[in-house]
Amino acid sequence: MSYTWEPRWEKFKVESHGIVFWTCRDRITGMIACPICVDARQACLGGGQGEGSNPIFFYTVDDLIYHLKEFHARNAFRGKGK
């Protein structure tokens, strides 16, 4: 049994709730990477094999959208108020 996982990324276009962007999806598991947590530009959109410091993956596009709105967008707005 293996405790590690080496993703095989492919480009994946997300079109949901009026939002369109590119990110990475693993060919084997179908898991979708957060394009911010996993540096998508480096991982699968034409760069090297870089990953962010804390990669986060999702099974559905809706879960990814929720993560982007609640984690990244909320933190961005908090930072502007300082």
Image (cartoon, helix red, strand yellow):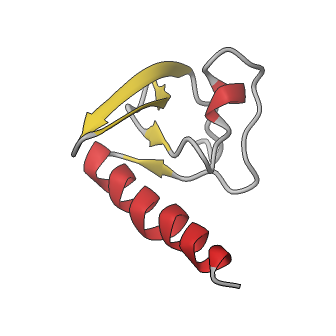
In x, y percent, where is residue 59? 34, 45
Q: Position of residue 61 (x, y in %)?
A: 30, 43
26 or 79, which lies in front? 79
Q: Residue furthest left?
A: 17
In which image quadrant can residue 19 be found? top left
Q: Is residue 16 left or right of residue 31?
A: left
Q: Residue furthest front?
A: 81
Return the residue nearer the eye: 5 or 8: 8
Q: Quadrant of the N terminus?
A: top right
Which residue is drawn at the image coordinates 78% and 20% (left, top)? 48
Name above or below for residue 68 compared with residue 76: above
Quarter of the rendering containing residue 5: top right
Q: Where's residue 80, x and y in %?
A: 64, 74
Write down the quadrant of residue 14 in the picture.
Answer: top left
Counting the numbered discs, the total is 0
Q: Eyeballing the image, is 42 above or below 47?
A: below
**Residue furthest toward the top?**
46
The residue under the point 63% across, 83% down is 81
